[in-house]
Amino acid sequence: MSDDAFTLTPLDIRKQEFRKTLRGYDTLGVEDFRVRVADALERAIRERSVLEERLSALTEQLRVFREREKAMNEALVAAQQLRQDTRAAAEREGQVIVREAEAEAKRLLDEARAAETAVQVRMAETERQFQQYVGGFRALLDRQLAELRALETGGQRG
């Protein structure tokens, strides 16, 4: 039975009057029952009201909890996205640093090779000059020795 079809209040029960008949119910018993039914109905209405208020409060609390849960889920998703974005940015930055380091290493290696080549060219030139000097010095010594021999041979003749 829905509440709209039949509404009975404690006041309705208290004010309800019954016809008296010769073979009717005990009037005091009916009165006592009517008071107890009205009291029980009042208690039930009060309890229902308290329960409805509690239901309303719990419904509101549930709504707040759901909003918090939604906000926390959104924050979690945002944090995960931020972590992924940060990781991707760090990986990109790391790749740039590695490429720059490789380029710098190649540049330094090229410079070192060029310096080595220049040193080898200078060493070859120095070796050539040394050999030329040694050859010139040997020729000078040979001439000097030849002159000494000539002096020695000419001095013995005389």
Image (cartoon, rainbow, N blue to C red):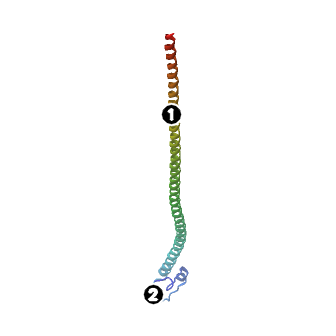
Q: Is residue 152 above or below residue 61?
A: above
Q: Which residue is mark 2?
A: 24
Q: Nearer the viewer, residue 155 or 98?
A: 155
Residue at 52% x, 48% y: name it: 101
Q: Amino acid at mark 2?
A: Gly
Dot 1 corresponds to which residue?
128
Q: Nearer the viewer, residue 118 or 135?
A: 135
Q: Secondary structure at mark 2?
A: loop
- 45 in relation to 135, above or below: below
Residue 155: numbered disc:
none
Disc 2 from disc 1: Cα separation: 150 Å
Secondary structure beneath disc 1? Answer: helix
Instruction: Name the residue nearer the viewer: 104 or 132.
Output: 132
Name the amino acid, label 1.
Arg
| x then y, percent, for residue 17 | 52, 86
Q: Residue at x 51, y 38 (%)?
A: 121
